[in-house]
Amino acid sequence: MRGVENAFELVDRITTQTAFQLHPPLGSAFKESQIRTAFVVKLSTIWGGAYRVLFIVPSWYPITPPAAYCLDTIKGQYLVQHMYRKDWRICFHYSVARDWSPKGCTLITAVGWAAIWLFCQEYLQKHGKWPAPVGMSERVLRRSPHPWPPRRR
């Protein structure tokens, strides 16, 4: 298991062109000139899931947090929650509560929040409910609104 001391071995800095290729909906949220840098972090969960998360650091960082996008499919029977539908960005902080502080938060904060978001997604798939206080009241939906009928023989 890798700790914080090895965390940067799991980071790949990429070009903005590569970021747009990895996640095409990115174009609906950013222009290439608005991106300061982009990188992909490989995160693993306690249940053994391994995911690549794309981080886009905008030119107005650190006023606002970087945008994060999960590049890999989260398997399970429920719809993934807490994503912005415009560009499928991970919703990992509560802007109304002003969780993000330019003085106290860094890129490492954003990576940690993305790891917590992945844990919550896997918990949702295993237990059918969202574990974090924000969002517990949201309805959990199955991936298909019409489950297949039982097989007849």
Image (cartoon, rainbow, N blue to C red):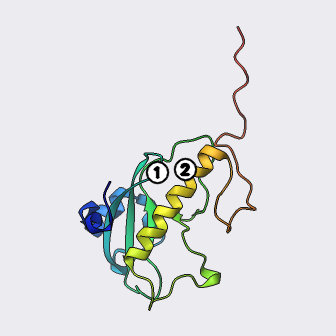
Q: Determine contact: label 1, label 2, CB under 8 Å.
A: no
Residue at 31% over, 67% down: 39
The disc placed on residue 116 is none
Q: Which residue is mark 1?
A: 46
Question: In the picture, residue 60 is in which quadrant?
Answer: bottom left
Residue lying farthest top? 153
Q: Give the foreground label among 1 and 2.
A: 1
Residue type marked 2: Glu
Tag 1 secondary structure: loop
- The number of callouts visible is 2
Percent coordinates x, y for residue 56 in the rendering: 38, 71
Res. 100 visible in picture: yes
Could you say whether the residue bearing mark 2 is in a helix, strand or loop? helix
Task: Point out the tag, 1 or 2, that comes first from the N-terminus.
Answer: 1
What percent of the width, then of the height, locates residue 111?
41, 69
Q: Which residue is mark 2?
A: 122
The residues tagged by marks 1 and 2 sit, at their Cα atoms, a distance apart of: 9 Å
Q: Residues within 10 Å of mark 1 (few under 14, many from 20)?
A: few
